[in-house]
Image (spheres, grey):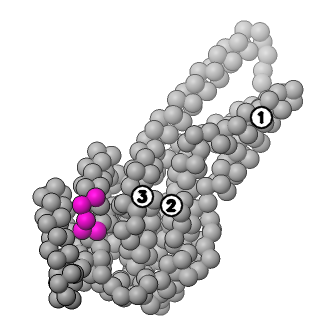
Amino acid sequence: MLLTIARSRRILFVGGKGGVGKTSVAAALALARARDGARVLLVSTDPAHNLGHVWREALGDAPTRVLTAGRGLVDAVEIDPQKTIERHFASVADTMRHLLPERLHASASAHLDRARTAPGSHESAVLERIAELVATGLETHDLIVFDTAPSGHTLRLLALPEQLTGWTETLLANRDRSDRFAAAARSVVGTRDEQPSADAQLRRTLIARRDRFALLRSAITDPARTAFVVVAIAERLPVAESIDVVRQLRELGVAPAAVVVNRRSPADAGPLLAERRSQEEQHLAVLRDATDDIPIAQVPLLPGDLAGAEALGALADRLAAAA
């Protein structure tokens, strides 16, 4: 069931409460699709990156090949918000230098320095990089899998594309009004602007940003292209948070395609684990009642550390067989 979902989509978000195994599930699904012959881009958006540890590879903001399986492959990225922030502000600073008279350059630079650490800069930078990776990844890969940060952070990110698209549209509308007023004033006094290149550059930058966010918003709200897999464990708090995540995803227009209940205790390994299994069944009943027709896949507790291609391959087998 999970592999069918991954085969039928171009973008897959894997999320849930911290510590439930999101990274392992995301990596195993990417590996399973690569075995199919797919080119997979696997992206961590979590500031506390674990993707490199799972693959036993040093990862960064640019794609690194972590697996080749016949015609299939997995390229992995750990988003570096600071690099994205620096690139963004370098571009803004360059534009401002063209637009502003030299006497204002120092104050503009001071303003940008403050803005780098303003609340929301980190989230905006992560979203900017996600939008870039979606735009390029849809052209170069068959599937993009996002290993996301814990639920609250991810839900805020998914709400941002619509907000930032609207904000950029407002900037462009204000810019258009200013241009019309300036053109009218020039016609009255009989002057012409022979070098509108700086304004044109700013407009192109705003339009490109708007289009990236619009593409991202369109992609993540299209259930034919994008799905969200919620990962949980059968305990009270993770189940409660997963139910809330499903509700909020639906409100955002994002399709929750499945819930993976990870690390199920065996029922035949002694009285302690049998008792734990019985308690898990009670929490699963609550989850089933609250998530309606969303499929729930159960994955057993596996021995050893889930790190390296061999261990991830074993988990991929379990995910492919889960029902």
Tag 2 residue: 45
Q: Residue furthest front?
A: 272
Tell me: residue 106, above or below residue 308: above
Badge nearest the viewer, 2 or 3:
3
Residue found 67% across the figure and 14% down from its top: 184
Image coords of residue 190 (percent x, y): 78, 12
Report the magenta residues as a range.
233-237
Instruction: Quadrant for residue 182, please give it.
Output: top right
Instruction: Quadrant for residue 288, please give it.
Output: bottom left
Tell me: residue 127, above or below residue 239: above
> Amino acid type of disc 1?
Ala
Residue 21 visible, this angle: yes
Q: Nearer the viewer, residue 187 or 34?
A: 34
Tag 1 residue: 110
Q: Specify few, some or many for label 3: CA neighbours under 10 Å numbering under 14, 14-19, or 20 or more.
A: some
Q: SS for tag 2?
A: loop
> Amino acid type of disc 2?
Thr
Image coords of residue 303 (percent x, y): 36, 88
Whether residues under marks 1 and 3 lie with C-beta atoms below 8 angstroms apart, the answer is no
Image quadrant in which the C terminus is located: bottom left
Image quadrant in which the N terminus is located: bottom left
Residue found 30% across the figure and 77% down from its top: 263
Q: CA distance from mark 2 to mark 3?
A: 10 Å
Q: Specify few, some or many for label 2: CA neighbours under 10 Å numbering under 14, 14-19, or 20 or more.
A: many
Residue found 49% across the figure and 47% down from its top: 213
Badge nearest the viewer, 1 or 3:
3
Left of 66 or right of it: where is 194? right
Q: Earlier in the sequence, mark 1 or mark 2?
A: 2
Tell me: residue 221, above or below residue 279: above
Q: Earlier in the sequence, mark 1 or mark 3?
A: 1
Tag 3 residue: 150
